[in-house]
Image (cartoon, rainbow, N blue to C red):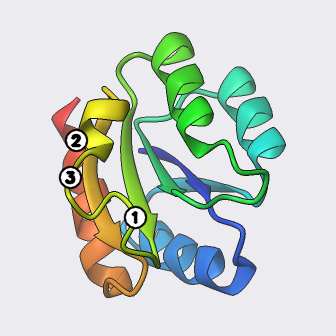
Amino acid sequence: MKILIAESTVPLAALWKRHLERMGAEVVVATTVDAAFDLIDQMAFQVIVMNVRLKGGASLAVADFAQFRQPDARVVFVTDSTFFSDGSIFKHSTNACAFLPSSTEPSDLAEMVSHYAHAN
């Protein structure tokens, strides 16, 4: 399974990456919106794990681009804020499959990502 992690907090992205790699995933990390756009344009992913507040401020634009370029890719949004806590992220992003707090246990996040990667 190929996974993109779009997360500006490098230690958190590295933690998630390690857990996913233990499950056999091929994982790349983007720490900015521009890097995420570039990777989506260059590689195919089953799942994109993306912070709603990704550095560069246009995570929904990244999700829209992914929907256009890779319509089968699912997006697991994570955040450390209460914005979108009402579930409206699913109205704004048609490829969103989950919305989790960034404090979610890395092993739980990895299991959820694996589930959606294999569901495609």
Three-letter amino acid code of the residue under disc 1:
Phe
Residue drawn at (81%, 44%), measured in percent from left and top? 35
Q: Secondary structure at mark 2?
A: helix
Mark 2 crowdedness (10 Å alpha carbons): few <14, some 14-19, many ≥20: few
* Label 2 sits on residue: 118
Pointer 1 with pointer 3, Cβ within 8 A: no
Residue 120 coordinates in the image, percent (x, y): 23, 29
Residue drawn at (56%, 13%), measured in percent from left and top? 69
Which mark sits nearer the N-terminus, 1 or 2? 1
Can you say which quadrant of the picture contains the N terminus?
Answer: top left
Residue drawn at (30%, 68%), measured in percent from left and top? 100
Residue drawn at (70%, 77%), measured in percent from left and top? 9
> Is 111 situated left or right of 66 in this image?
left
The image quarter containing residue 15 is: bottom right
Q: Nearer the viewer, residue 25 or 5?
A: 5
> Is 29 situated left or right of 78 in this image?
right
Q: CA–CA distance between discs 1 and 3?
A: 9 Å
Residue 112 coordinates in the image, percent (x, y): 23, 62
* Label 3 sits on residue: 87
Three-letter amino acid code of the residue under disc 3:
Gly
Where 105 sits versus 119, above or below?
below
> Is 40 situated left or right of 45 in this image?
right
Residue 23 coordinates in the image, percent (x, y): 36, 67
Mark 3 crowdedness (10 Å alpha carbons): few <14, some 14-19, many ≥20: few
Q: CA–CA distance between discs 1 and 2?
A: 29 Å
Q: Is residue 117 visible?
A: no
What mark, if any, has residue 83 been given in the picture? 1
Which mark sits nearer the N-terminus, 3 or 2? 3
Q: CA–CA distance between discs 3 and 2?
A: 24 Å
Q: Nearer the viewer, residue 45 or 30?
A: 30
Mark 1 crowdedness (10 Å alpha carbons): few <14, some 14-19, many ≥20: few
Q: Secondary structure at mark 1?
A: loop
